[in-house]
Amino acid sequence: MEQLNGLVQSLDDHPERRQLLASCDDHNSVVQLACSWGFEIARRWGDGETNVKELPTKNLLIGHDLDPGDEKQHVLCQGPGWRLMRIESCAASSPPEFWYDQCENEWLTLIRGSARLKFLDPDECFDLSVGDQLLIPAHRRHRLVRTDPNPGTVWLVLYWLENSPPQVSNLNP
């Protein structure tokens, strides 16, 4: 608590630091900035341990500056017959008259933004927002109608082959 109180006093004593603090995108950036000013605060406010090992992966919520219509895909992990992907879309949509007809099952959830998907046979539209999830069976024709503009929409998507359900023995390292 002393370090946190000292940081707050430092912001009062040095008003220019407030803008630097406000420009931080995530908690880890706040911790780094505070450390550069001589304060040792924990990874999370109230944690006693300051020497915490960082994960080797990037934060799933932090996005890239994509141009409208762009999409960025990244395979997070995969195995025989399956893959888990992070997809970031900025004001994206499927090309006119294009329909996905994939041989894989697809489970998706939105972790940022919103999207609209359209399906054939039967004709349906789904509006998705943060936390929504959807299972798309293999060969169910669908298209992306829209995603949010900047900062965009972020999806977690699990694909697996029709006759090969994903099998993972241990998700923890």
Image: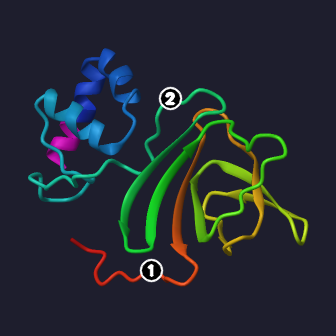
Q: Is residue 149 above or below residue 128?
A: above
Rendering coords of residue 80 (x, y %): 38, 74
Label at residue 65 = 2
Whether residue 79 appears in magenta in the rendering, the answer is no
Q: Residue at x 22, y 43 (%)?
A: 4
Rendering coords of residue 128 (x, y %): 72, 58
Rendering coords of residue 123 (x, y %): 91, 66
Which residue type carries mark 1?
Pro
Mark 1 secondary-structure assignment: loop
Q: Nearer the viewer, residue 110 or 168?
A: 168
Rendering coords of residue 172 (x, y %): 26, 74
Label at residue 43 = none
Mark 2 secondary-structure assignment: loop
Q: Nearer the viewer, mark 2 or mark 1?
A: 1
| Quadrant (top left/top right/bottom left/bottom right) for the C terminus | bottom left
> Are discs 2 and 1 less than 8 Å apart at CB?
no
Which residue type carries mark 2?
Asp
Magenta segment's dominant SS is helix
Q: Is residue 82 left or right of residue 131?
A: left
Q: Residue at x 52, y 73 (%)?
A: 160
Q: Which residue is mark 1?
A: 166
Q: Is residue 126 left or right of residue 151?
A: right
Callout 2: 10 Å neighbours few (<14), some, many (20+)?
few
Residue 132 lies in what quarter of the image?
bottom right
Q: Which residues are magenta?
A: 1-6
Q: Nearer the viewer, residue 42 or 53?
A: 53
Q: Residue at x 71, y 70 (%)?
A: 139
